[in-house]
Amino acid sequence: MASRYKYTKEISYFAYFTNRKYGIVSEREPVVFSYNRSGVGFHLPSRRQQYQLASRSPQSPSLRKDDDPDYPAKYSALESWLKVNVNRDELERWIANLRNWLSQAIFAPIVKQIHFLNKELHRVGHGEVQIGESSIASLKQVAILKSGQLPTLNQLIPYLELSSNQEYVVQRIKDLGGGGYIKDFRWDKGGDYKGKKWDKELPSDSALVMHMFCTFMDSQLPPDPKYPDGKTFTTRYFMKTPDKPDLKKDNILMFQTKITPAHYKIILGDDTWDLAKGRSNMFQAILFFLHHIRSKHNGMLGRVNLGPAGINLLALIKDDLQQLLE
């Protein structure tokens, strides 16, 4: 079966992950991005290139009086990280690690794959269909018709499904993938579009980055018949308003309580944990989720190991990350 997935030119890291999971990828096949278990698959840039953390704001942690009355939290933003024994310096390092990983492990490879597949669409006689110009429905139709020639197109499509405005989504992915640490990230809005300022009809950068992370995690979890659309992680571990969580003992949720500006909380069992409002809120939600999996579930997300024996995302919240990457 491995030969079925061979490319004569290039194979994306999406195919590498999916095929490797089911034992149908050859180690000799070239890959755009090799996900290194021992080092989270990326290298820290030189100190000169590193993302500079924003100065601390004494007003950044939200207090209980500012809590959302519709989704009250048991633990305020000021309490949540202290409760799990994580200090501000650790958290800021983890945020920088996460931004670097998102840039190099998700956004940059996807941008490369978009360029590659648009060329391949011309080669296989479907040049009228282009990623960033055509609708999701058109891309899905070609993915079915040309599955043998374009095996990674179907794996790319879920990353683009956040909005029907494909031109904006693809352009913003390229913008954020164009520099380390997704440096153009704007937490409460997005990028300019067709010479006009971003408006609320378009997804914010927070929504886009969270969608990309959840879609990546969907690709890492094994198929589950309960989720035939393949969105196992997104369905089980992410929710956004106006949906309301059913507070149950086994809940582990990243919950978006506000759309614009985006705000995320963590729900563990029947407890809600708030996180600081503002530019780092979405990153903190992902990190708090990972920290909980490491500390309370031995690094296991269902049957998937998030530690060194698996996809090693937990290296993002280790103090020895630099050593892991060397």
Image (cartoon, helix red, strand yellow):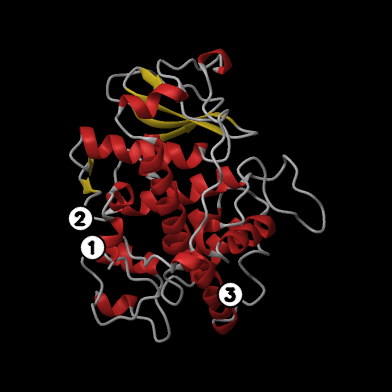
Q: Quadrant of the N terminus?
A: bottom left
N-term mark: 3 or 2: 3
Q: Nearer the viewer, residue 271 or 76?
A: 76
Mark 3 — residue? 118
Give residue 262's mark: none
N-term mark: 3 or 1: 1
Q: Nearer the viewer, residue 123 or 316?
A: 316
Give residue 38's mark: 1
Instruction: Categorize mark 3 by other alpha carbons within 10 Å: few (<14), some (14-19), many (20+).
Output: some
Relative side of 23 to 120, left or right: left
Amino acid carrying label 3: it is Asn
Could you tell me which residue is drawn at 67 percent across and 48 percent down? Answer: 190
- Percent across and percent down for residue 144 are 48, 65
Q: Disc 1, disc 2: CB below 8 Å?
A: yes
N-term mark: 1 or 2: 1
Q: Quadrant of residue 278?
A: top right
Question: Callout 3: helix, strand or loop?
Answer: helix
- Percent across and percent down for residue 24 are 24, 70
**In the image as oriented, which residue stretches furthest toward the right?**
195
Amino acid carrying label 1: it is Ser
Mark 2 — residue? 308
Question: Callout 2: helix, strand or loop?
Answer: loop
